Amino acid sequence: MNKIDFEMPCPVEYRVSGWLHDYLPLRRGLTVRDGEVLEIPVDDIKKAMNCRGGIDFAFVLDENVFVAVSLLGRCVATYRYRTNPGLCDLYRAEDGEPWVDAACSLRNGRAVYELSSLFLLTKKNRIIKLSIHHGHYRPSFEYDVQIEQSQEYQRILVCAVPKSSSMGPTDATVYLWAPKKRMLQMFNLFRGGGRAESKAELNREVRVKRPKLLQDGQMTEFDYDPHALTVYMDEQSHSVLCADRSNHILFECFLNYSESRLLCGQGIPGRSGENVETPAALLSAPCAPLVVRPWEYIDINMFDVGTKDLIKATKDGALPRVVLVCDGGNRAVRKIWQFPDHNMAQDLANLNRFYTLLGYDAERGGPGAELLNIRCGRPKALFVGENGQLAVTTDKTVYVLISGNVQAEENCVKGKLSSDS
């Protein structure tokens, strides 16, 4: 593993083997296998599903299988993407009620839970929960819940850990985006003995305000289109990332005090180069934001000592982090590295830079640039599997990016921070 030079401007590793951790180097002498970029044509998935709609989401379950969701076709499939590609199993809706959005919650550890959960939001404000067994990979109906609110919901987010409730044990907790009210509403879901007995409890509401940007002593407020948002829950930062494809901005709303700040975009479509300051970067029709913290997918002991200190530099653990977003109009996936203002961050303190993870740049090429130089279709969804496999869903292809250090140990589990790490 090469030592990373921290002199500015900082280098970014564009090879598959390093995209997950580049600024957070691993231990010296660690053997790291080459990473992979797998390409699965959307037409092959649709044919296997016998589905008339497109593929809206690919949720990676493990190193072999992802879940493909077609909202228009109202069907869910488990699909082998690595060896012997093809359909594992299929779930198709029994009624004709349109699906609006989908979200996936992965199992919490191999030995304890063998099920992942898929949540489907319908046009009539119904939430359908499916479970997927990591063995036979069969999507199975568990229950559905009718949300008794006179709102039009467009997005669903799943909390990793269900919130407590006075009504009893909570099966799951979700946020629903109500664009007309510009509000996120949190619901606890309860599984009953039958469909009529399952219920939902409104627990909390957060209004998403217009994002602001403080630059050169001037505060600028940006408008956003509530009907054009795609959102992602960053529970570690207690915030929601919002990508507005109409106004070409990416911003973050903090749940604890309902304030929003602009991350990047200027309200007009554009394209930025590499290694620019994130607030100055331009986007075109962004969507599907995602947050990745590499130590959640890499065993913490695989990092060098300095990296461990940097990861533990702040008490809340919000930074450092990687923010990914689909830059739809530019047919690219962008990568933003953010580091805390802390002495443990050394030369990376306050780093907030914008790069390309997946896309095409005619001026770049040669060894180590393969991730930057893929002519991908229009990206529309991102998801990270339990071992760090990144699925990028485009209009024509599903890409699965497997970082080399993740591939190296088949039984690696999410890293844990502790005082003796």
Image (spheres, grey):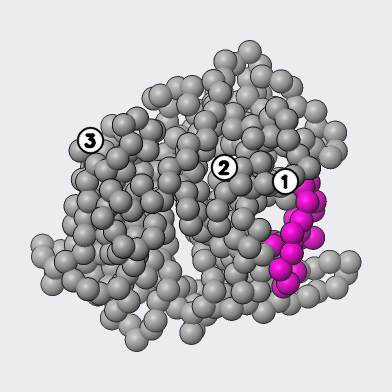
Q: Position of residue 205 (x, y in %)?
A: 46, 75
Quick one: label 1, few (<14), some, or many (20+) residues within 10 Å?
Answer: some
Q: Is residue 224 magenta?
A: no
Q: Quadrant of the C terminus?
A: top right
Quick one: label 3, few (<14), some, or many (20+) residues within 10 Å?
Answer: few
* Mark-to-mark CA distance, 1 and 2: 26 Å
Compared to residue 339, the image places residue 210 above or below, namely below
Q: Position of residue 175 (x, y in %)?
A: 41, 67
Q: Amino acid at mark 3?
A: Gly
Q: Residue at position x 74%, y 44% from top?
A: 362
Q: Position of residue 319 (x, y in %)?
A: 64, 47
Q: Is residue 277 magenta?
A: yes
Compared to residue 409, the image places residue 151 above or below, namely below
The front one of 262 and 154 is 154
Residue topped by disc 2: 293
Q: Residue at position x 57%, y 42% from top?
A: 293
Q: Amino acid at mark 2?
A: Arg
Q: As drawn, is 396 to the left or to the right of 102?
A: right
Q: Earlier in the sequence, mark 1 or mark 2?
A: 2
Residue topped by disc 3: 135
Q: Nearer the viewer, mark 1 or mark 2?
A: 1
The front one of 342 and 359 is 359
Q: Quadrant of the N terminus?
A: top right
Residue topped by disc 1: 361
Q: Residue at position x 84%, y 40% from top?
A: 9
Q: Position of residue 406 (x, y in %)?
A: 50, 29
Q: Quadrant of residue 23?
A: top right
Q: Earlier in the sequence, mark 2 or mark 3?
A: 3
Whether label 2 touches label 3, CB < 8 Å: no
Residue 200 visible in the snapshot: no
Q: As drawn, is 195 to the left or to the right of 223?
A: left
